[in-house]
């Protein structure tokens, strides 16, 4: 991972807190490698599909929440992609466990990353 962003939509019905990650990896004319939350799969010579494999949990004030997926991108900038999550599920806001003005520390755990490897055809 090269960088990340965090924001707050300011509205519970549009997700509240979000976090995004930018994955980058080496590439050349011989091939490329990318450790990411997105599995990029070649379908045929002219197309591919992608699936977000990553999962994230957020531990806050003794509670552990399963984070919802926010988005993902295809390959971009030649060397990587992006994937993102809503930090807390809507139920955490509805129950009052989390507000839109939190000032604490959240422990985030991202799992199920995928090692994408591409090689030049012989």
Image (cartoon, grey):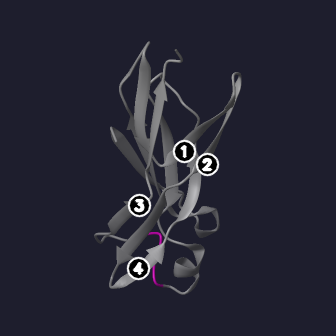
Q: CA distance from mark 4 to mark 1?
A: 26 Å
Q: How far across and how far down the image is residue 22, in percent?
A: 42, 40
Residue behind mark 4 = 64
Q: How far across and how far down the image is residue 114, in percent?
A: 46, 48
Residue behind mark 2 = 51
Name which residue lies at 42% across and 16% down.
30
Q: How far across and how far down the image is residue 43, in percent?
A: 69, 34
What residue range appears in magenta? 97-101
Q: Secondary structure at mark 1?
A: strand
Q: CA distance from mark 2 to mark 3?
A: 14 Å
Q: Are marks 1 and 3 in contact (CB under 8 Å)?
A: no
Residue behind mark 3 = 111
Q: CA distance from mark 2 to mark 1?
A: 5 Å
Q: From this view, report whether residue 121 is shown above or below residue 110.
A: above
Image quadrant for the N terminus?
top left
How many C-alpha atoms fall within 10 Å of the one at disc 4: few (<14), some, or many (≥20)? Answer: some
Q: Quadrant of residue 48?
A: top right
Q: CA distance from mark 3 to mark 4?
A: 14 Å
Q: Secondary structure at mark 2?
A: strand
Q: Secondary structure at mark 3?
A: strand
Name which residue lies at 64% across and 67% down.
13
How many C-alpha atoms fall within 10 Å of the one at disc 2: few (<14), some, or many (≥20)? Answer: some
Q: Are marks 2 and 1 in contact (CB under 8 Å)?
A: yes
Residue behind mark 1 = 39
First reached walking from the N terminus: tag 4 or tag 1: 1
Q: CA distance from mark 1 to mark 3?
A: 13 Å
Q: Are marks 2 and 3 in contact (CB under 8 Å)?
A: no
Q: From this view, report whether residue 67 is shown above or below residue 41.
A: below
Q: Secondary structure at mark 4?
A: strand
Magenta stretch: dominant SS?
Answer: loop
């Amino acid at each position: 991972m090269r960088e990340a962003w965090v924001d707050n939509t300011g509205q519970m019905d549009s997700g509240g807190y979000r976090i995004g990650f930018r994955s980058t990896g080496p590439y050349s004319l011989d091939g490329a490698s990318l450790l990411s939350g997105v599995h990029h799969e070649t379908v045929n010579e002219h197309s591919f599909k992608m699936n977000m494999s990553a999962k994230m949990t957020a531990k806050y004030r003794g509670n552990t929440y399963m984070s919802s997926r926010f988005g993902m991108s295809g390959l971009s900038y030649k060397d990587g992609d992006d994937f993102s999550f809503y930090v807390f599920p809507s139920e955490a806001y509805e129950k009052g466990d989390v507000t839109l003005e939190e000032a604490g520390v959240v422990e985030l755990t991202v799992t199920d990353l995928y090692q994408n490897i591409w090689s030049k055809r012989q």
